[in-house]
Amino acid sequence: MWKVIGTTPNGTNVWFNTHTEKGFMGDDPEKAAVLDAYLEASEAMGDYGVKYDKEKPRPSLLFRSLNKAVHGVIAVLEFGAKKYAVDNWKKIEQDRYKEALGRHYLALMAGEKNDPESGLPHIDHLLCCALFISEMEKQNGKY
């Protein structure tokens, strides 16, 4: 998890935690003070480039942590694109997706794992409907 990524000009080790993405300077990363300006240390060493994206969204949090769920939603989107057309969902009223979400939820709660038409899990259809609704709400300025 911790690794030395370089040394400052005065000989201090610069540590980087690949899990938390935090940098530290010193001999022991567990005792060292948090280096809020990890980028400044990297820049001072001259060996590393600088990219100021610390406050930007990290899509890897979704793809790494929820990989199987994302693949399930993609499978539902592929099914819909073949059955109707790519992005056809954008032309449908939001209430229709609220109803579809409810139907998939009821089927799931009744113990039915897969949608009989698509063969895909109801939970993935439910997630897809929720994403459609969320996208529509945000595009309409409601959030």
Image: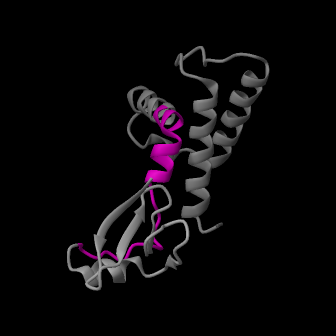
Query: Is residue 89 positioned above or below 121 on the image?
Result: below
Query: Is residue 129 positioned above or below 34 on the image?
Result: above
Label tally: 0
Report whether 95 appears left or right of 36.
right
Percent coordinates x, y for residue 14 in the rendering = 36, 72
Percent coordinates x, y for residue 114 in the rendering = 61, 17
Residue at the (74%, 34%) spot, across then down: 102
Percent coordinates x, y for residue 69 in the rendering = 54, 35
Residue at the (69%, 42%) spot, across then down: 98
Q: Which residues are magenta?
A: 48-71
Q: Residue furthest left?
A: 47
Residue at the (53%, 41%) spot, across then down: 66
Pick the front one: 127 or 55: 55
Pick the front one: 53 or 74: 53
Report whether 102 appears left or right of 78.
right
Report whether 16 appears left or right of 104.
left
Colour basis: one colour
